[in-house]
Image (cartoon, grey):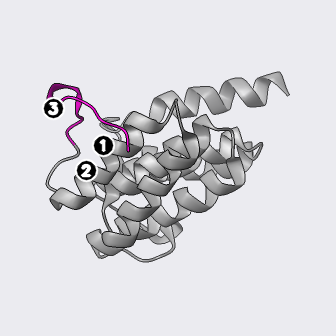
Amino acid sequence: MTSFDDDETLDFGDLPPAVDQLLQQGVAAHFSDRAAAERHFLDALALAPDALPAHRCLVKHYNRCRQFDKALAAARGWVMAAARQADLPDNWLLWNTAPGTALSALKGLAFIHLRSGQPARAEAAIRRVLAMDPQDGVGGSVIAALIEETLLAA
């Protein structure tokens, strides 16, 4: 088990203590023991399947490990959990408006599509984010710029 000081913990918001602890342990283990980090994130999701920070941690973990198939599946799970919490349709193409938590998840999915060599899918998802977030509160424009750069380089 990885240990860390309280001042080194991340604020994941209002989560059950056991879930927060697993996420903290996963983050702490990410660079030293990636298998342990993955276990901690998956255990957190098993305890709280709709804990959006746990989904985000798992997606980021897989992305950093360059495990894009796993990252894509995890990002889809993140979008589904965010949709459930916001009482949105399962299909994000049907979203007309969405809270920031759902938009962040969809932005994450767009990024993983881009990283996994699917720029057209990334572009469709980020267009949806930008349409619902014209003030760019979740930072979709950053992913849109990366997509544009990728498409221009192709």
Residue in the image at 38% along x and 47% along y: 104
Neighbours of disc 3 within 10 Å: few (<14), some (14-19), many (20+): few
Residue in the image at 73% along x and 44% along y: 116
Name the amino acid type tagged 2.
Gln
Residue in the image at 53% along x and 56% along y: 75
- Between 28 and 122, the one lying in front of the other is 28
Q: Is 127 situated left or right of 102 in this image?
A: right
Contact? badges 1 and 2 (CB < 8 Å): yes
Task: Give the residue at mark 1.
Answer: 24
Neighbours of disc 2 within 10 Å: few (<14), some (14-19), many (20+): some
Q: How far apart are the two marked residues, 3 and 1, measured between alpha carbons?
A: 10 Å
Contact? badges 3 and 1 (CB < 8 Å): no
Q: Quadrant of the C terminus?
A: top right
Task: Give the residue at mark 3.
Answer: 6
Which residue appears farthest toward the right when viewing the image? 154
Q: How far apart are the two marked residues, 1 and 2, measured between alpha carbons?
A: 5 Å
Bounds of the magenta span? 1-11
